[in-house]
Image (cartoon, rainbow, N blue to C red):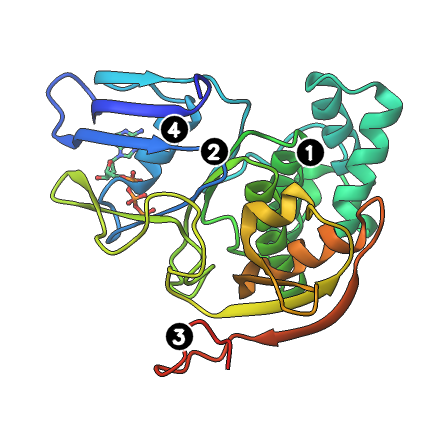
């Protein structure tokens, strides 16, 4: 897809004679793929994410593709002269919504992140957690084709952290590319389609990670959902799960555990909703790796 972002031989250094922070970086962010960027402190992860968000430009190399992008920076500028709701409403109108629709979307987002009580609080008076919720809400408001999260879970409470994980699964299910950095290796563990490590001034793809969103072959816990209902299954569900018809005419979907909520929501909110027969963890038995036992 033309809009998918691609870095080719990208390098960045700060100042004409500054040391190279990154060099010879090649990276593709295909639609519907979740990409993790990891690496020790100070190696250039935030620099890379700023280049992906196009809020910074490379010193050498090219960045191509123009997906509609949203970015949660490591440090969100919270000293803005708006209340949280006015700020989000304003951004919604910038993204093309009418004022009424923008206000509704802004209120919904704050609600989903448990921040409805902060709607009328000036941004400059928000706590670290409150302002982080607004940072995340602003990024999701635009339903971006590329979502970039730099330590976006930091400062969020447990419910908001879970909500952000769900939102990531929703974005990839809707066909968006998502790229994230997080200090916690358990964050979205097993869910990433690709993991890249910043080391020695460049980006290394961790081997063993599949190139794109795939079926049950990747690492991480899996959930098996069995449903009855019409074929074909909703596209949002098929993007995240591998499906097969069972002998008695039900559909058996295998999905990453972190994505099971999104798949269930797609099935239950379908035009003709599905009847959920069972939801179980995939028991990986070496004698029965597909869990058909
Ligand atoms: N605006 C800037 N001007 C000058 N140097 C910078 C700038 N931004 C980053 N650097 C330098 O670039 C290097 C990489 O920084 P960056 O913040 O990208 O790393 P990081 O891997 O995200 O670090 P952390 O894990 O600590 O957030 C560091 O040496 C940093 O000091």
Which label sits on residue 289? 3
Total marks shown come to 4
In three-dimensional space, the C-alpha distance between marks 2 and 4, rounded to whole angstroms, equals: 14 Å
Q: Is residue 77 above or below residue 156?
A: above
Other residues around mark 2 within 10 Å, as few (<14) / some (14–19) / many (≥20): many
Q: Nearer the viewer, mark 2 or mark 1?
A: 2
Point out the tag, 1 or 3, that comes first from the N-terminus: 1
Point out the tag, 1 or 4, that comes first from the N-terminus: 4
> In the displayed image of the protein, which residue is found farthest to the front?
247
Q: Nearer the viewer, mark 4 or mark 3?
A: 3
Q: What residue sits 79% from the left and 29% below the top? A: 86
Which label sits on residue 52? 4
In three-dimensional space, the C-alpha distance between marks 1 and 4, rounded to whole angstroms, equals: 19 Å
In three-dimensional space, the C-alpha distance between marks 2 and 1, rounded to whole angstroms, equals: 19 Å
Judge by depth and name the residue closer to the eye, 170 or 254: 254
Q: Which residue is mark 1?
A: 141
Q: Which residue is mark 2?
A: 31
The answer to whether the beta carbon of the residue marked 1 is less than 8 Å from any atom of ligand 1 is no
Q: Is residue 114 visible?
A: no
């Amino acid at each position: 897809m033309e809009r998918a972002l691609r870095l080719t031989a990208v390098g960045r250094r700060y100042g004409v004679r500054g040391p190279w922070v990154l060099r010879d970086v090649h990276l593709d962010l295909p639609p519907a793929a979740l990409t993790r960027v990891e690496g020790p402190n100070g190696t250039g992860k935030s620099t890379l994410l700023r280049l992906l968000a196009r809020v910074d430009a490379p010193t050498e190399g090219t960045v191509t593709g123009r997906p509609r992008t949203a970015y949660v920076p490591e440090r969100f500028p919270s000293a803005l002269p708006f209340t949280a709701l006015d700020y989000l409403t304003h951004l919604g109108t910038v993204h093309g919504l009418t004022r009424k629709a923008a206000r509704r979307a802004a209120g919904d987002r704050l609600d989903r992140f448990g921040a409805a009580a902060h709607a009328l609080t000036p941004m400059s008076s928000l706590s670290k957690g409150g302002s982080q919720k607004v940072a995340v809400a602003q990024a999701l408001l635009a339903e971006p084709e590329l979502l970039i999260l730099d330590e976006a879970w930091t400062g969020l409470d447990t419910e908001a952290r879970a909500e952000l994980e769900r939102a990531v699964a929703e974005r990839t299910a809707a066909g968006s590319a998502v790229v994230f950095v997080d200090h916690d290796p358990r964050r979205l563990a097993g869910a990433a389609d690709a993991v890249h490590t910043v080391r020695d001034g460049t980006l290394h793809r961790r081997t063993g990670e599949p190139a794109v969103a795939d079926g049950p072959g990747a690492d991480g816990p899996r959930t098996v959902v069995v449903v009855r209902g019409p074929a074909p299954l909703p596209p949002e569900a098929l993007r995240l799960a591998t499906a097969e018809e069972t002998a008695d005419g039900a559909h058996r979907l295998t999905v990453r555990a972190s994505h099971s909520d999104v798949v269930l929501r797609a099935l239950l909110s379908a035009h003709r909703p599905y009847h959920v027969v069972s939801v179980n963890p995939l028991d990986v038995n070496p004698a029965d790796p597909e869990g058909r036992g």
